[in-house]
Image (cartoon, coloured by chain):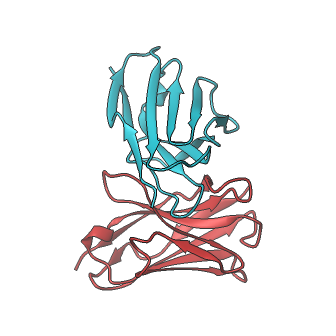
Amino acid sequence: DIQMTQSPSSLSASVGDRVTITCRASQGISNFLAWYQQKPGKVPKLLIYAASTLQSGVPSRFSGSGSGTDFTLTISSLQPEDVATYYCQKYNSAPRAFGPGTKVDIK
Amino acid sequence: QVQLQESGPGLVKPSGTLSLTCAVSGGSVSSSNWWSWVRQPPGKGLEWIGEIHHSGRTNYNPSLKSRVTISVDKSKNQFSLKLSSVTAADTAVYYCGRIAAPMGWYFDLWGRGTLVAVSS
């Protein structure tokens, strides 16, 4: 089965900073990758699918890129409401594994 | 607007069977979507459990496959999860979700989640 890893596991940044999270698949998955945001105590929320397509209603400061095995989620200007854990998920085939998550907070 | 709501016992004894149901409202479980279960142990990450189509086709996480059954009840517009031989390691918040198939096999809708504890 394809394994998903994320780095870093956590990060602390200042409001307005550019934040980048990396997700790596152990084998190529084309662009079949989604990103989710989970705020503390809340349900996960879809941010991006097909590696770079922004879900309707998601702020444009979020963007995704990558294909094959290496992907990134970028927050262009970190806001206080972006404090959350971010998960990638591969969905090219079952099992549709999640990455371990990256916790983002404000410095 | 489609909504999902999980229900089931919040406490299951070790070696017992965890049973949860996800009711679909505002839409039909017989649509082109697939339907899925994910769990999250306290303080940990998300684990994909499996998925089902209204035709009955299923896919399961290999790590849980021997213990998991996901089924669909079109007459009640719901789908269900059964996990047998549970241990404390199965304590988690269990989420049901809608898969955006055929567009893509990602979650575009989640239930609120339900905490299931395994304890005697």
Looking at the picture, how far across and down is residue A52, in whole percent? Answer: 63, 35
Instruction: Look at chain B in the picture and name its colour.
Output: red
Q: How many marks?
A: 0
Looking at the picture, how far across and down is residue B105, in whole percent? Answer: 63, 57
Looking at the picture, how far across and down is residue B51, in whole percent? Answer: 58, 69
Q: Is residue A24 left or right of residue B59?
A: left
Quarter-of-image position of residue B3: bottom right
Quarter-of-image position of residue A49: top right
Q: Residue furthest top?
A: A16
Vertical arrangement, residue B18 with respect to residue A36, above or below: below
Q: Name the residue nearer the viewer: A45 or B32.
A: B32
**Residue placed at 58% from the left, 60% from the top?**
A93
Q: Is residue B92 left or right of residue B52?
A: left
**Residue placed at 56% from the left, 72% from the top?**
B59
Vertical arrangement, residue A90 with respect to residue B61, above or below: above
Q: Residue furthest left?
A: B120
State the quadrant of the C terminus of chain B: bottom left
Vertical arrangement, residue B17 with respect to residue B58, above or below: below
Quarter-of-image position of residue A50: top right
State the quadrant of the N terminus of chain B: bottom right
**Residue placed at 61% from the left, 53% from the top?**
B106
Instruction: Look at chain A in the picture and name its colour.
Output: cyan
Q: Name the residue nearer the viewer: A96 or A103.
A: A96
Looking at the picture, how far across and down is residue B46, in whole percent? Answer: 42, 55
